[in-house]
Image: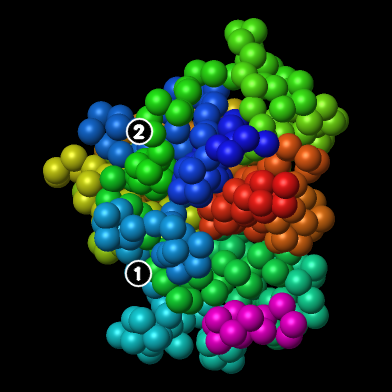
């Protein structure tokens, strides 16, 4: 390779941007290609009628270790949810809060019918074990499922079904709770050491901040890649770009196709979200609401403008609803079913709400089978001159995407230094 190796990164999502930042910091020459019209991949935000809509309901965990090291949280102006949730069960909402950070809810949490007092005390044990990396060991190993872990800790079926399944099912887009225990441990530790939050200017602000350290001229948008020819990249336009190394920073299916391998038949985990314009917030405060009844299409809901006022125009409220995998109706029937359930939760005020948008994000998260195979360990080098990164290469999380981008850059650096 030359003194200043030329690297082409295919994909301007968080992993690709993190990889590029690390490489530019070591004097590499990089070109980032993306088929879309904007950076960020699945982490993007739009302005619609004055509302700030993320591409599918997303939240940011400030306790993620890689994100803490890479991002400037003060510049993101993170706005936090309350540490806990309002659980909808048996006709009303029940508060379940972290007593370490919201002690004023300790009595309400202990007395709620969302699990037993023993369950609430066991949550504290789960918190400590996750923070000290003992959760997977106590659950029997990182390859066990999240549900296996909850059972190993002795949580009652009521706690599992009324809180953990709807809450974690929304986090992992996995109502079966089959997500590997090792991933659960990482995410629960992040919940425990930090806040669930939103950047004041939307989730897309994360990608924009990552791109600040990258020369704008090196990012080429609307540049879909057709195929690879060794370390040469052939664009759909027919243009050919030479490089010393190529990084596949796309989703898992696109990466497989570019490697010339069969595309995985597992479609990954899909996210379905609906946004509503409301004259007033149906619930005051930055709460995440979860469906503990297990009935209907709604999995979780939140008033995003109660978390960050910038998400809605003055005098309006933005309500986000994330659906469970029960959502198999067509668009008209689905909207009607969601509105019926919202009326059950909040009454007739829902009749004055306006549906803004429905987001259906295919491959919002990678297949669980890939996470099981990788077991959260990044392996960025595919063959000499070809590397990959992305959330599927690590934990399937935003933090995993950032970490895998750095690891791909480190693999390239190691290979260059070995020459």
Within-10-Å neighbours for mark 1: few <14, some 14–19, many 20+: some
Q: Foreground mark, 2 or 1? A: 2
* Left or right side of 302 for 392: right
Q: Does the magenta portion include 136?
A: yes
Residue 18 makes an appearance in the image: no
Badge 2 density bin: few <14, some 14–19, many ≥20, Cα 10 Å: some
Q: Secondary structure at mark 1?
A: loop
| x, y percent for residue 194 | 42, 72
Residue 237 coordinates in the image, percent (x, y): 60, 8
Q: How is the image coloured?
A: rainbow
Could you tell me which residue is drawn at 39 percent across and 57 percent down? 71
- Residue placed at 22% from the left, 46% from the top? 310
For the residue pair 65 and 325, the one nearer the viewer reads as 65
The residue identified by callout 2 is 46
Secondary structure beneath label 2: strand
Residue under the image location 64 percent in, 8 percent down? 238
Residue 351 location, quadrant: top left
Q: Which mark is residue 82?
A: 1
Q: Is residue 269 above or below residue 6?
A: below
Q: Nearer the viewer, residue 362 or 211?
A: 211
- For the residues labelled 2 and 1, the Cα–Cα distance comes to 25 Å
In the depicted structure, whether residue 86 falls above or below residue 339: below
Span colored in magenta: 126-138
Q: Main secondary structure of the magenta part?
A: helix
Name which quarter of the figure residue 186 lies in.
bottom right
Quadrant assignment for the N terminus: top right
Q: Is residue 144 visible?
A: yes
């Amino acid at each position: 390779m030359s003194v200043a190796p030329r690297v082409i990164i295919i994909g301007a999502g968080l992993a690709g941007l993190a990889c590029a930042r690390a490489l530019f910091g070591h004097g590499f020459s990089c070109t980032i290609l993306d088929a879309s019209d904007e950076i960020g991949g699945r982490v993007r935000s739009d302005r619609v009628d004055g509302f700030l809509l993320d591409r599918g309901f997303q939240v940011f965990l400030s306790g993620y270790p890689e994100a803490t090291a890479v991002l400037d949280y003060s510049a993101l102006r993170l706005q936090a949810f309350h540490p806990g949730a309002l659980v909808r069960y048996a006709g009303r909402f029940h508060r379940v809060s972290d007593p370490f950070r919201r002690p004023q809810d300790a009595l309400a949490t202990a007395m709620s019918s969302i699990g037993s007092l023993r369950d609430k005390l066991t949550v504290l044990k789960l918190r400590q074990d996750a923070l000290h990396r003992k959760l997977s060991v106590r659950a029997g190993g990182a390859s066990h499922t999240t549900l296996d872990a909850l059972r190993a800790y002795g949580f009652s079926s009521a706690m599992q079904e009324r809180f953990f399944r709807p809450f974690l099912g929304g986090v992992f887009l996995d109502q079966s709770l089959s997500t590997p225990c090792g991933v659960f441990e990482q995410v629960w530790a992040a919940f425990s050491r930090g806040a669930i939050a939103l950047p004041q200017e939307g989730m897309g602000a994360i990608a924009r901040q990552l791109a600040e350290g990258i020369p704008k001229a090196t990012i080429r948008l609307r540049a879909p890649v057709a195929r690879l020819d060794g370390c040469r990249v052939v664009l759909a336009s027919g243009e050919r770009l030479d490089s010393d190394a190529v990084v596949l920073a796309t989703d898992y299916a696109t990466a497989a196709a570019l490697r010339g391998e069969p595309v995985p038949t597992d479609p990954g985990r899909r996210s379905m979200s609906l946004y509503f314009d409301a004259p007033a917030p149906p619930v005051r405060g930055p709460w995440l609401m979860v469906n503990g009844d297990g009935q209907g299409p709604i999995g979780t809901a939140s008033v995003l403008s109660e978390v960050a006022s910038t998400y809605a125009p003055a005098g309006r409220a933005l309500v986000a609803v994330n659906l469970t995998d029960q959502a198999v109706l067509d668009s008209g029937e689905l909207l009607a079913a969601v509105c019926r359930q919202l009326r059950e939760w909040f009454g007739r005020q829902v009749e004055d709400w306006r549906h803004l948008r429905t987001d259906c994000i295919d491959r919002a998260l990678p297949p669980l089978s890939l996470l099981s195979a990788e077991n959260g360990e990044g392996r960025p080098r595919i063959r000499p001159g070809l590397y990959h990164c992305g959330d599927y290469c690590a934990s399937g999380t935003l933090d995993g995407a950032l970490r895998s981008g750095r690891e791909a850059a480190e693999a390239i650096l190691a290979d260059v230094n070995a020459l």
